[in-house]
């Protein structure tokens, strides 16, 4: 996710802004930039420096620049609208270079705002959603930047953390937030050395201050060297007591969590919301980045999904979603096997490539094989500008932000959401999903962020159940239908980070060999949430119980029968079976995480594994 830093004070602007961006590198980025209000010879003007790629490229650009001033903003960008490039990177400036802004988040109605501003004569240099904000500020400027920002915020649909500076008000840094984090750091200096900071999170400013104000949604703040004013959503001034941060810098980067993996598990409600944002309008799914004609979409007769590891499990889930809703046959292939199997592909086939990085070597090779055969291709990708996003006929961006933990968590749920969105999109284009059905599906999708939050509140309860793996040398995960893939993902998470061997099966397969493994050192993890095959799964659990097996079951809230046959039960909220993978996978992630930590293992960097596999 993008990062923001801002400073007003008498320290070296170059040093504070650049060091802050360095601290924010862990969030992930593809470009970076700073804007400073230069006050050389008392001639206030905005100087902006931007560069793509690694942060040191920006460092080289500003290294020999003489930057004199007391006010500036900086940004690391993770592309969501517009490919990674210098022109698309932040900060963005008004046409007369009098206002400069940085922005985290997504403005969903940017296209409509852009059209309106274009009619007024504003010229856009970038493809970003952010540039509309700086032109809105310019168009509505009242002589008071904070007042102007409060005025335009109701025009913005979506999420934002904003920081703005203006040559017309050289003594103030103005910010706002909604849905994206932003903190104010209170400087420790006194008298002539007074100063204040803003940042996406405290890691960027912790070396300067441990006194911070956490802003709430819809609040606007005006920051001077010696003063901080905060207005609530009703434009009333409010007083906020600062919080003292007692974290180390490393802990701050993790948001106070013990590991990045746990932090990323907890980010899933927001990631689900972010992936849905801008892609659902009314009862329709909107995907701007698919460059296929109506005729090409209508003629799709078969779908292939190609992916590796966790993304492959997302593909298995996608097969169930697509086939049940579109009634189109779907084949799911491990990317490393796809092109070597001499796949049968035609020009009316659609090949979906799923890759968090967009650079997975085997998946990229599968894309090229599909294009060679004349098939249409769509990538489900988290990184804009990656090879798959550039070469595919269309892309769905998951907006999950940087995922540091090697074992994928939030990227997986984002991929699932993208597959639901793609199914809705194709269903409308092919007239195979009615408007009523689409409305029902969208209603359920919009419930998922809240349900994910409910599950995360049960974290400590789930953590208490990891004793089932005490002494385990292996384990079996079972599910049925759409949740077979979630059993696979649960087993992968356990073996990735706890090093306990695990296998997953459709539950009906237990009696075809796997029951022989059941013992005190091989427990069963069963997904038995409310579904069309609930009774079947329950019978399979009873088979394991009859053989003295240790069992932990994922069940729907209110299910009293499961408690009679399972040693441990984790209860999750009830939702239509079609959407249960999102609800069911989060407890699996938490279970694996606490099993690994109980063994004192390096959860973020499991042995022998890499985050992105860019070689065969």
Image (spheres, rainbow, N blue to C red):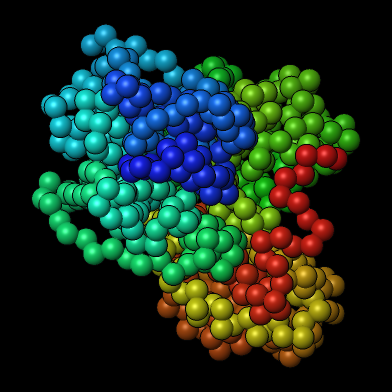
**Residue 564 seen in the figure:** yes
Residue placed at 27% from the left, 34% from the top?
Answer: 156
Within the image, what quadrant is residue 386 found in? top right
Q: Is residue 242 above or below residue 414?
A: below
**Residue 215 seen in the figure:** no
- Residue nearer the viewer, 609 or 456: 609
Within the image, what quadrant is residue 286 found in? top left
Q: How many marks?
A: 0
- Residue nearer the viewer, 298 or 332: 332
Q: Is residue 559 above or below residue 181?
A: below
Residue 488, image x and y in percent?
70, 61
**Residue 488 left/right relative to 107:** right
Residue placed at 53% from the left, 22% from the top?
Answer: 86
- Residue nearer the viewer, 249 or 395: 249
Quarter of the image with the C terminus is top right
- Residue nearer the viewer, 40 or 233: 40
Residue 346, image x and y in percent?
74, 23
Residue placed at 64% from the left, 43% from the top?
Answer: 356
**Residue 491 left/right relative to 158:** right
Residue 341, image x and y in percent?
87, 36
**Residue 144 left/right relative to 12:** left
Residue 226, image x and y in percent?
23, 49
Within the image, what quadrant is residue 483 found in? bottom right
**Residue 317 left/right relative to 239:** right
């Amino acid at each position: 996710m993008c990062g923001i830093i801002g400073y007003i004070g008498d320290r070296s602007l170059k040093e504070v802004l650049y060091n802050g961006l360095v601290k924010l590198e862990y969030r992930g980025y593809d470009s970076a930039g700073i804007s400073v209000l230069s006050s050389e010879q008392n001639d206030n003007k905005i100087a902006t420096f931007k560069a793509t790629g690694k942060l040191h490229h920006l460092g080289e650009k500003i290294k020999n620049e003489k930057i004199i001033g007391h006010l500036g903003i900086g940004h690391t960008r993770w592309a969501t609208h517009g490919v990674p490039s210098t022109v698309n990177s932040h900060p963005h400036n008004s046409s007369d270079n009098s206002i400069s802004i940085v922005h985290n988040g997504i403005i969903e109605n940017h296209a409509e705002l852009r059209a309106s501003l274009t009619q007024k004569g504003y010229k856009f240099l970038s493809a970003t959603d952010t540039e509309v904000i700086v032109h809105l500020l310019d168009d509505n400027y009242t002589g008071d930047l904070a007042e102007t920002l409060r005025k335009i915020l109701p025009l913005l649909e979506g999420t934002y953390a904003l920081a703005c500076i203006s040559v017309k008000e050289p003594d103030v840094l103005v910010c706002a937030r909604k849905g994206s984090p932003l903190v104010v750091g209170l400087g420790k200096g006194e008298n002539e050395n007074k100063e204040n900071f803003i940042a996406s999170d405290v890691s960027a400013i912790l070396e300067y201050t441990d006194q911070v104000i956490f802003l709430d949604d819809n609040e606007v703040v005006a920051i001077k060297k010696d003063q901080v004013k905060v207005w609530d959503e009703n434009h009333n001034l409010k007083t906020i007591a600062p919080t003292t941060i007692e974290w180390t810098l490393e802990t701050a980067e993790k948001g106070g969590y013990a590991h990045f993996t746990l932090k990323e598990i907890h980010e899933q409600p927001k990631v689900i919301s972010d992936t849905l944002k801008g892609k659902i309008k009314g009862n329709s799914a909107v995907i701007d980045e698919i460059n296929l004609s109506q005729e090409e979409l209508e003629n799709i007769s078969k779908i292939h999904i190609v992916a590796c590891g966790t993304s492959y499990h997302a593909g298995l889930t996608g097969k169930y979603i697509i086939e049940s809703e579109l009634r189109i046959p779907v084949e799911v292939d491990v990317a490393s096997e796809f092109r070597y199997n001499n796949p049968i592909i035609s020009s009316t086939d659609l090949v979906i490539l799923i890759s968090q990085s967009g650079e997975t070597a085997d998946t990229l090779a599968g894309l090229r094989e599909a294009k060679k055969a004349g098939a249409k291709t769509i990538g489900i990708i988290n990184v804009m500008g990656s090879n798959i996003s550039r070469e595919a006929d269309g892309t769905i961006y998951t907006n999950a932000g940087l995922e540091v933990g090697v074992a994928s968590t939030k990227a997986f749920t984002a991929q699932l959401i993208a597959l639901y969105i793609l199914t809705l999109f194709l269903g409308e284009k092919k007239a195979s999903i009615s408007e009523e059905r689409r409305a029902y599906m969208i209603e359920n999708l919009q419930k998922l962020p809240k349900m994910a939050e409910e599950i995360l509140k049960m974290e400590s309860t789930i953590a208490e159940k990891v004793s089932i793996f005490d002494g385990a040398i292996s384990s079996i995960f079972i599910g049925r239908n759409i949740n077979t893939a979630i059993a696979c993902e649960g087993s992968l998470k356990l073996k990735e980070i706890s090093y306990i061997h695990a296998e997953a099966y459709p539950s009906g397969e237990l009696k075809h060999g796997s029951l022989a493994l059941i013992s005190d050192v091989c427990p069963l993890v069963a997904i038995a949430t409310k579904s069309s095959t609930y009774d079947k799964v329950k019978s399979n659990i009873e088979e394991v119980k009859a053989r003295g097996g240790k069992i932990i079951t994922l069940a729907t809230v209110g299910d009293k029968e499961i408690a009679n046959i399972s040693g441990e039960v984790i209860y999750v909220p009830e939702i239509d079976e079609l959407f249960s993978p999102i609800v069911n996978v989060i407890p699996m992630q938490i279970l694996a995480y606490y099993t690994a930590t109980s063994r004192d293992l390096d959860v973020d960097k499991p042995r022998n594994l890499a985050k992105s596999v860019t070689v065969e």
